Amino acid sequence: MSESTNDASTAKETVGRYGVWSVGLRSEDPSRHGEIAEAAAELERLGYGAAWLGGSSAPRHALPLLAATSRLAVGTSIQSIWQYEAEESAAAFAEVESAHPGRFLLGLGVSHAKLAQQYRRPYSALVAYLDALDKAGVPAGRRVLAALGPRTLELSRDRAAGSVPYLVTPEHTARAREILGEEPLLAPEFKVILETDAATARTLARENLAMYLTLPNYTNSFQRLGFTEDDLTAGGSDRLVDALYAWGPEDRIRARINAFHEAGADHVALQIIDGDDRNTLPRQAWRHLSDLLR
């Protein structure tokens, strides 16, 4: 077992059972930091254990949320290893850790060839990045990896506190838990559409899914889970859409989220899909969801 086992257990306690995943919770615009801080404080009051900063976030993006709260954990989901040098990440991690000890998780991933010009040998590059973080003093137990395939899940087990896989199903979670073992944190992201009409919900889902269907890291993951080429065409089959997005009556949405825990997840990072700009903060939906989860 990884030397980060104890820290992995701490990470589980820190993030709790549920969190939110949002691109809108990070911003380079200082004028938005007050709005973000207010939203973070409300998330903590609503009982969420963690806020995951979507997109290629950096440690500094966590500061407004951490300053506005006392218990909420904040993680990057994810920081692309191609966007920031490891030494830069380590220095930023140290700054955040000094100001808010024990509440920040550095979520890392290799992103996608389509999105990173220097993309090359991603697994080897991730290993080298972790080596550099080790050298710079970033604890293995305070970083998590966006792992979809078996090799990167093994790396999450051996070199990090665990994994934060994105755009996955409970079946993926069950396979990931087998690879990770019992101790590492497993915190999948899952998308929720608060809509009961099937046609409306699936339209919103397909609008969101369209970009991901152009990225081989995801389509390969879907095929490992048993989806076929037919499932990946025409915006995604109903079978694929319904596996990746929770929609319908509240009891159905609750059951879909619970399925991740039953499959071995410690924490589920919930992303609201409502058709709005991803940079907005769906605070009313977060309130509704917190009531549903209770």
Image: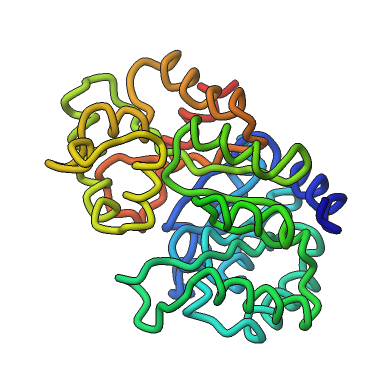
Q: Position of residue 203 (x, y in %)?
A: 18, 35
- The quarter of the displayed image where residue 2 is located: bottom right
208 vs 144: above or below: above
Identify the residue at horizontal 47%, vertical 75% (top origin).
121
Q: Foreground residue, 102 or 120? A: 120
How many tags in the picture? 0
* Lateral position of residue 275 relative to residue 176, left or right: left
Quadrant position of residue 188: top right
Observer-nearest residue: 28 or 176? 176
In the image, 120: left or right of 72? left
Where is residue 33 drawn, in percent x and y? Answer: 51, 66
Residue 180 as seen in the image, left or right of residue 20: right
Residue for point 35% across, 82% down: 117
Q: Position of residue 224 (x, y in %)?
A: 40, 42
Q: In which quarter of the image is residue 182?
A: top right
Q: Position of residue 221 (x, y in %)?
A: 40, 47
Q: How is the image coloured?
A: rainbow
Q: With 108 as the anchor, is 181 left or right in this view? A: right
Up the image or down, 247 lies above or below 252; here it is below
| Residue depicted at x 65% and y 53% | 154
Relative depth, front residue between 132 and 63? 132
Residue at figure coordinates x 63%, y 47% from the top left: 50
Where, quadrant-wise, is the C terminus in this rendering? Answer: top right
Q: Farthest residue in the left direction? A: 234
